[in-house]
Image: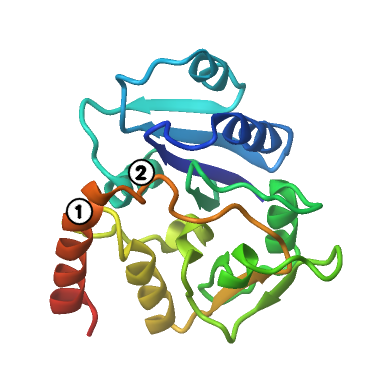
Amino acid sequence: MIYSVVIPTMWKSNLDKFYDTLQNFCEDDRVKEIILIDNDITFEHSIKSKILALSKIKYYPQEENIYVNPAWNLGVKKSIGVYIIHMNDDFYITSNHNITSLITSHHNHINKAVSIYGISTSCYIEEPTSNEIYLTDNEGRGTGWGCFFIIPRDKWVNIPNELKIWFGDDYLTKHVLSNGGKVYTFKNIKASPFSQTISSQTFNNILDNDTKIYMEKYDK
């Protein structure tokens, strides 16, 4: 089982937590590479050098912000993994697990059908009831789902580049379901609040445009 991790970043998250999560990936033998798409090359901070020095980082700086969905497409194009983990730079686990717990849960539960695995909305609001991570296929893609999800590389379909930030996960889950696959969610962990990086008002116009494009062209 070989995993590639794809992470777009604008360096606006909790960078210490981001570094710790990347270290978790580096310590897991199943993870072969971390593809970091830098959407803000002007950012300067000492921790950036530490992050880029991590053993499994493959660094792809962008001259301008290409946004999340195009960055996901680029990351998959550059990847070698059998399975691709897509993660927001502000996603980290706050309960008694680490990021490799999710990889193990996926590894132990891989469905032969074309399946995609993401994070349940409950993970952002509920404390775990035990040390066991649950998986369900009857919840579907909820709020915050796209902050961390896993998809087989050979089942990836490029998200239309006109969708900049939102609805990329909707587009992918719709594709999986239309091809007989299932949408699974990880449950019973506690994760960081979602969408911290894009909470700025400057992204409202992009949200409006992404919503209009998706609803008119792809939500059929």
At 30% from the left and 19% from the top, the residue drawn is: 42
Q: Quadrant of residue 14?
A: top right
Q: Nearer the viewer, residue 1 or 128?
A: 128
Q: Is residue 87 above or below residue 213?
A: above
Where disc 2 sits, the SS reads helix
Query: Which amino acid does the dot numbered 1 rest on?
Result: Asn
Query: Does dot 1 land on a helix, a strand or a loop?
Result: loop
* Percent of width and height locating residue 97: 78, 51
Question: Where does residue 39 sit, x and y in percent of width and height?
Answer: 31, 33
Query: Is 61 positioned to the left or the right of 79 in the image?
Result: left
Which numbered disc, 1 or 2, marks the residue that appears first in the sequence?
2
Q: Position of residue 2 (x, y in %)?
A: 62, 46
Residue 112 placement (x, y as % from top left): 61, 74
Neighbor class of circle 2 (other Cα within 10 Å; few <14, some 14-19, many 20+) is: few
- Residue 157 versus residue 93 in the image, above or below: below
Q: Quadrant of the C terminus?
A: bottom left
Mark 1, residue position: 161
Q: Is residue 142 left or right of residue 21?
A: left
| Residue bearing the label numbered 2 | 77
**Image quadrant where residue 43 sits:** top left
Q: Which mark is residue 203?
A: none
* Residue 143 appears left or right of 91: left
Extreme residue toward the front, this view: 201
Residue drawn at x 57%, y 65% is 119
Q: Residue 217's quadrant in the figure? A: bottom left
Q: Residue at x 54, y 18 (%)?
A: 47
Q: Residue at x 36, y 43 (%)?
A: 77
Residues at marks 1 and 2, CA–CA distance in whole angstroms: 14 Å
Q: Amino acid at mark 2?
A: Lys
Q: Nearer the viewer, residue 103 or 110?
A: 103
